Amino acid sequence: MRKHIVAGNWKMNKTFEQADDLLNEISEKMEAVTLGRDTQVIVCPPFPYLEMTSDYSDESYFAAGAQNVSDQEEGAYTGEVSAAMLQSMDMEYCIVGHSERRAYYHETDEIVARKVNQLLKHEIRPIVCCGEVLEEREANRQFDVVKEQITNGLFHLSAEEFGQVVIAYEPVWAIGTGKTATPEQAQEMHAFIRSLVAEKYGKEVADDTSILYGGSCKPSNAKELFANPDVDGGLIGGASLKADDFLSIAMSF
Ligand code: 13P
């Protein structure tokens, strides 16, 4: 059965000391809260804090993840970080294809597919993001856009490989805007994504796939979003930077 997942994407926030404080607070507070047995909490800080996050995660109940990875194996790629490096630092998850990377760093579905391949080769579970921009939703093209992103980014995988993938639906118009998709809009898209997976890999694989919602998810709306049958958790930006808000979201199932 699929897991409930709440993953914090810190994006480009926090200094080293602030990151240490937040990880410490999350670890301590997690001791005191009761999460559902099938709930996985993941923290994805910037690269320089991965080792520290991995150390905290060894002693705590959350898993560590990265926000990005190179699509290349190794070598002369200045500034890049490989999947082998992430594996050697015990990363369990890595976000791929976030809309900010697609928009600002020209990450295409083909690059996303190569990054997913690198991660799977190194036994790291990809959290693959998809989602439409506002103009696409206004033109009622959201389903076509998401179908293309999922098909091009993921459907080259075998069913066994696909079983390692987590999908995050993040409507771009809801990211950092305070404007959340309604529970109905989220459920509609998540059910659509699951139907695509079922068509390609069969019902069993689709039923086991965790599909997360992202975009202005916060303690006040997490419960109604997560109550939907096809919403298996959240990819959290701003609200993951405060331990209380993040854990309150993790307790919203
Ligand atoms: P916000 O929660 O800040 O809207 O960000 C969502 C997101 O992009 C997570 O990856």
Image: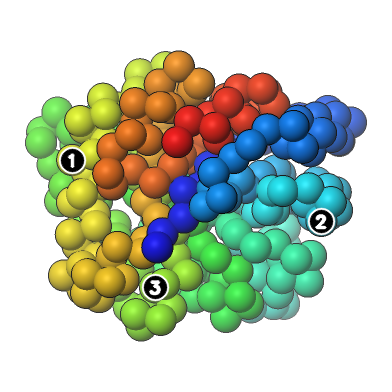
* Amino acid type of the residue tagged 2 in the rendering: Asp
SS of the residue under disc 3: helix
* Amino acid type of the residue tagged 1 in the rendering: Glu
Q: Contact (CB < 8 A) between labels 1 and 3?
A: no
- Residue carrying label 1: 188
- How many badges with numbers are in the image? 3
Colour mode of the rendering: rainbow
Q: Residue at x 81, y 33 (%)?
A: 28
Q: Decide: few, some or many residues near mark 3? Use Cα within 10 Å; few <14, some 14-19, many ≥20.
A: many
Q: Residue at x 18, y 51 (%)?
A: 192
The tag earlier along the polypeptide, 1 or 3, is 3
User: Where is 162 relative to 216, above or below?
Assistant: below
Q: Which mark is residue 162?
A: 3
Residue 200 in which image quadrant: bottom left
The tag earlier along the polypeptide, 3 or 2, is 2
Q: Which mark is residue 58?
A: 2
Q: Residue furthest right?
A: 17
User: Where is 194 relative to 156, above or below?
Assistant: above
Of circles 3 and 2, which is in front? 2
